[in-house]
Each structure stands twice: as C-alpha cells, then as structure tokens.
C-alpha cells in the first residue's frame, strides 16, 4: 500500500513539474512573440517615419525648385524688358541701293534694326531720271502736291522700344527724297534721338535734316552726315565712333 501511495505521489510530482514546464514554455513563447511584435512595430514605425521624412524633403526640394524656376523666369522677363529699351532703329529709303548699303553698315555696327521705306508705287529707273523733264521725280519736284508718296508701311512695330533712330535717304534737289516725308509725318519722335544721314554724288546734307526736324516737330534731331554714293564700311564706322553713342 505504501508502495502504491509512493508511486501515486511520484506521478503527481512529475505531472506538476510537467505542467510547470509547459506553463513556463508557454510564457516564454508568449513573451518572445510579444517582443517580436514590438520589434516589428518599432521597425515599421521607423520605416514610416523615414518615408514621411523623405517625402517631406522631396516636397521641400520640389517647392524650392519651382520657386527658383519662377524667379528665373521673372529675371529673364526683366532682362527682356530691359533689352527692349534703348534700342536702335535704322530707317531708310534707297532709290538705287547706295543709301541701303550705308544703312546696313549702321545697323550692323550699332546692332540696330533695319526698316526700309517702300513706296506703294515703286520708282523705276525712268522715274528717277532727273534730266528728263517728264520723269516722275522731275514732276514731283516741280509740283509739291505730288510728293505725298504712299508707303507700304509708315509705322514700325515696337516703336516705343527705340531710343535712337537713324533716318537715311538720297538727296533730291538739295533736300531729302520725299518718300521719307511720309514716315516722318506719321510718327511721334518724342524722347528719341534722331540722326539723319544721306547719300549723294555731289550735293551735301544741306538743310535736309533741319527740314525733316521741322516737319516732325518732336525728337532731338542731330546734325547728321552726308556720304558719297560709294561710301565704305570704314567711312561709316568712323562717323559712328565720333557720335559716341
């Protein structure tokens, strides 16, 4: 009997120890699982925080880039507006090409824009024969009412952007070829420096510039320059240098 009791007690002890072991193992496993879950949550939170910081940094960088782009555009716009001021325009009427050559030299040297005055009814070689009493220029010279020459265009785009205007023409009977008159009468030269120039085989500038100035009634007109019909680029550059533009 004692032997059986001893065996029962031993069995009970063993079962208790097994239960304790199982409970301990279960507790250990639960603790490990909790730690693993906490670690995963911590890592996930860290990753989310890092991603949020990265996204925020990218947003800030994009905003700075956009701001820089706007600033650059505004700056470019400002430069364009500044470049639009103080420009040089070279207006000319050329009957035979001599004045056109001088005008081209001036535009190239001053980085100016060219604007050719073209009569709606162009002058032919016969029209320009001043030795013929019946030629067009002779009749227009004798009858001032015929000098109102219509031009293809008598105004210039962006006229206000030019501070300096050169006006070139051949000399006809001691004055500026009258197709130029139409342009001068059609424009306001207020605030502009106007510099006349002419070409001729023998005649000088005469009062051509002064007469145009009176006709315009506005602008600061300079004395101007007369060039021979075969003026060279060096002749033109030397004159431009003397103007100290």
Image (cartoon, grey):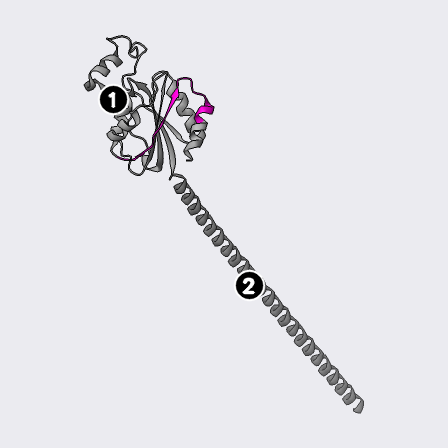
- Taking the image as shown, residue 197 lies to the left or right of residue 136, namely right
- Position of residue 173 measured from the top left corner of the image (x, y, whole percent): 28, 17
Residue 75 got which mark? none
Residue 112 in percent (x, y) is at 41, 31
| Image quarter of residue 51 | bottom right
The region drawn magenta spans 218-236
The quarter of the image holding the C terminus is: top left
Q: Residue at x 38, y 36 (%)?
A: 87
Residue that mark 1 sits on: 150
Which residue is identified by label 2? 49
Q: Earlier in the sequence, mark 2 or mark 1?
A: 2
**Can you give x and y, in whole percent of width and height, for residue 175 in the image?**
28, 21
Front residue of 194 and 77: 194
Would you say residue 221 sits in the magenta stretch? yes
Question: Which quadrant: the N terminus?
Answer: bottom right
Residue 201 picture location, percent across and down: 37, 16
Q: Secondary structure at mark 2?
A: helix
Q: Is residue 162 visible?
A: yes
Residue occupying image coordinates x 21% and y 18%: 146
Q: Residues within 10 Å of mark 2 (few under 14, many from 20)?
A: few
Query: Camera-side residue: 172 or 114?
Result: 172
Q: Is residue 14 above or below residue 197?
A: below
The image quarter containing residue 244 is top left
Q: Secondary structure at mark 1?
A: loop
Q: Is 195 displayed left or right of 149 in the figure?
A: right
Displayed quadrant of residue 81: top left
Question: From the viewer's perspective, is the residue at label 2 or at label 1 nearer?
Answer: 1
């Amino acid at each position: 009997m004692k032997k059986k009791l001893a065996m029962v007690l031993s069995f009970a002890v063993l079962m208790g120890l097994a239960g304790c072991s199982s409970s301990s193992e279960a507790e250990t496993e639960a603790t490990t699982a909790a730690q693993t879950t906490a670690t995963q949550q911590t890592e996930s939170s860290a990753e989310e925080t890092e991603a949020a910081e990265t996204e925020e940094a990218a947003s800030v960088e994009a905003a700075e880039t956009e701001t820089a782009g706007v600033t650059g555009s505004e700056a470019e716009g400002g430069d364009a507006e500044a470049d639009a001021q103080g420009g040089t325009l070279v207006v000319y009427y050329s009957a035979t090409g001599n004045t056109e050559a001088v005008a081209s030299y001036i535009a190239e040297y001053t980085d100016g824009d060219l604007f050719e005055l073209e009569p709606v009814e162009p002058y032919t070689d016969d029209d320009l024969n001043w030795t013929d009493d019946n030629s067009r220029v002779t009749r227009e010279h004798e009858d001032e009412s015929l000098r109102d020459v219509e031009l293809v265009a008598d105004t210039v785009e962006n006229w206000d952007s030019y501070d300096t205007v050169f006006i070139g023409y051949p000399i006809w009977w001691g004055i500026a070829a009258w197709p130029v008159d139409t342009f001068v009468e059609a424009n306001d030269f207020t605030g502009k420096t106007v510099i006349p120039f002419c070409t001729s085989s023998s005649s000088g500038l005469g009062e051509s510039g002064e007469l145009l100035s009176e006709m315009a009634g506005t602008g600061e007109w300079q004395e101007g320059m007369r060039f021979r019909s075969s003026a060279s680029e060096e002749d033109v550059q030397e004159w431009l240098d003397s103007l100290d533009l």
